[in-house]
Amino acid sequence: MSETGNAQRAATIAVLVENEAGVLARVIGLFSGRGYNIDSLTVAPVDDTGRISRITVVTSGTEMVIDQIKAQLDRLVPVHKVSDLTMEGPHLTRELALIKVVGKGEHRMEALRLADAFRARVVDATTESFVFEMTGNADKIDAFCALMRPVGLVEVSRTGAVAIARGPRGLN
Amino acid sequence: MSAATKPASTEAALTMSGAEVVLRALKDNGVDVIFGYPGGAVLPIYDALFQQNAIRHILVRHEQAAVHAAEGYARSTGRVGCVLVTSGPGATNAVTGLVDALMDSIPVVCLTGQVPTHLIGNDAFQEADTTGITRPATKHNYLVKKPGDLARVMHEAFYVAKSGRPGPVVVDLPKDILINKAPYTEPPIAEHRSYRPQTEPDAEQVRKAVRLMKAAKRPIVYAGGGVINAGPEASRLLVEFVRMTGFPCTNTLMGLGAYPAGDQQFLGMLGMHGTYEANLAMHGCDVMLNIGARFDDRVTGRLNAFAPTSKKIHVDIDPSSINKNVPVEVPIVGDAGRVLAAMIECWKAEDAPQDTHVLTAWWRQIDEWRAKDCLRYRQEGKIIKPQHAVKRLYEITQELGRETFISTEVGQHQMWAAQYFGFAKPNRWMTSGGLGTMGYGLPAAMGVQIAHPDALCIDIAGEASILMNIQEMATLAQYRLPVKVFILNNEYMGMVRQWQELLHGGRYSESYSAALPDFVKLAESFHAKGIRVTDAADLDAGIREMIAYPGPVIADIAVAKDENCFPMIPSGAAHNEMILGPEQEGGVKGVTDEGKVLV
């Protein structure tokens, strides 16, 4: 353990929880109470009965801290399963963003060209604005937003990351 | 869990009020006594209590004391302690007790009243967000919003409190849920849906650990509260294992009693105020078996200098305790008793011989450390040394041979009790280890006395701590509980004073216990006996008088005011930098600011 030292790494952790009142507060309280980072967190019910929710949390820390985060999550009573997707092999991460751009003339054309290059869809338009929808990993959305800033970016809404392991194996 | 429960019978199912369901669930989970304090939101439960005889209610004088009493009951019996308090201030007053139980892994179920469901969130009278406030103060908590959930939640609360690493569980009960009819279901047999702690160890890990220990040249066993929590059989197995291996054994503050104090292989307590031999053996060992302890900062001292030459085996039922503070070579998740049983089996089965020659050399080294006699003190003249008071208390109780339980408050007296009172059996020692709660000892002793009516229950206290829950003297009087409060009165918050002397230039900021009550009169006003001893020559007589009296007693023992608690590992120091006594206090004064920031 000690060999890994102080090197920080990011971890995408999937947590299956009983969908009961207060469960999200327990998870978030654990991170704030013990001083862990949350880079992003998403949650929604994922089974047909609505009894199980999946929380995807992106965090960072030393190997020892990340092991500690997983162990602390796992001992919460309503937690069914904790999986470190980053460690457990290849996985996919996606985030959805809605991006509002306001402008006229050449700026408007440029916005559309950039959106096309990034495969963002127009989901709302007025004569002076667009709302683009795009999915991708966080880096792609960051890059798109950076490019849009000079052409009239006014507002961004992002879901935070959801992730799943590649291949046939399921988490449950 | 929920899927497996069935109503006891369909007709009976809806004849009970929520309050009756609560009491029935308590009974079916083996509760015979509950510590509580009434109020508006829990009146339906008090009404139901009035109409039954299965559960005895003990009326405390403050809700914090109810939780500590339940902790004392739990720690001395191995059962779940049970608490009943009202909404709002009842619940907030209980919070300190809940955190105390959380830090020390004590199984407690605390029922809190709540305003009716339709008023939740309206800032109603005596409303508090109890589940919000107690979320980080408990192992788990519940707010019951539907009558159909009540029985399941009650049973689940007991399951969660006592299984895995035990802890406190809050069940928040809105008043309408208590008044309206609710179905009752028996405790379930099926597994919990998500919470299933691992109790059986991995056989391969046990084998690895045993191989490591067989080859050890300088081994040590460091056992903590997890062994006590695993039940008396685990303590018996610990003794068997330690005798079989010939290893030295030390206990944490929480683990005292897990290994018999008088035994030759016992090195005493380790840590900040542990013995010289225990701490040096920890520092110098090559193989460490940590069983049921959590590498607490009071135990490890400076982490980067902790047992630097050792390979470590860590047995814990809570996987999050492993590699939290100290990285270990062989982690084993499981119940301390089951792991010890597996290790004993494996030790017998492994052919590799033990090198008894190197072990003898290790013991020779340990005996040299022991010869320092680090707990020696000099009792001279009239002024009573606090160490001497505890030692005489121990010796006299030994001589009388009565079943004795000790609780403490927090501070110097607590450490002297840990150092000078020997525990031969588990479950006889109740102290607030993790949270360090002043005011713990008197209510804890009360809970112990309720569970063991004929035993001798003594709260070793300080004059400052005892005032934090002094109102419980009235509870002792009401239930004729013959608890003995043995105050080491040095007129200071002694541990604060000691740190101010050693680390803050002797500036005794606010640590003097000014305007103390006359403890004899105070005892008498609470219908108890008061004794004051000021001369060492009268100490034994005072102790004997205290023990012989059939009711509650406060014995106010005036002790040396400026005595410091040694040995001591100054904050930020390593085990081998410990200070043995006043002659080495200079070593403490060299503590850096980095050390001073540590508590």
Image (cartoon, rainbow, N blue to C red):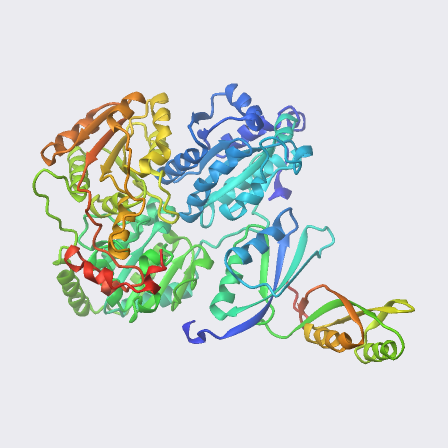
Viewer-side residue, B115 vs B384? B384
Where on the picture, by quarter, is residue A86?
bottom right
- Do we see residue B239 in this rendering? no
Image quarter of the C terminus of chain B:
bottom left
- Do we see residue A34 in this rendering? yes
* Residue B59 horizontal/vertical position (percent): 43, 26
Extreme-left residue of the structure: B381
Viewed as shown, does residue B52 lie left or right of A100?
left
The residue that appears at 39% across and 66% down in the rendered structure is B330
Extreme-right residue of the structure: A127
The residue that appears at 45% across and 50% down in the rendered structure is B165
Where on the picture, by quarter, is residue B284?
bottom left
Viewed as shown, does residue B188 lie left or right of B237?
right
Viewer-side residue, B136 vs B215? B136
Task: Say above or below: B199 vs B148.
Answer: below
* Residue A162 horizontal/vertical position (percent): 68, 65
Viewed as shown, does residue B471 lie left or right of A32?
left
The residue that appears at 32% across and 35% down in the rendered structure is B466
Image quarter of the N terminus of chain B:
top right
Viewed as shown, does residue B374 lie left or right of B487?
left
* Residue B179 horizontal/vertical position (percent): 63, 25
* Residue B576 horizontal/vertical position (percent): 23, 65
Task: Say above or below: B586 vs A50.
Answer: below
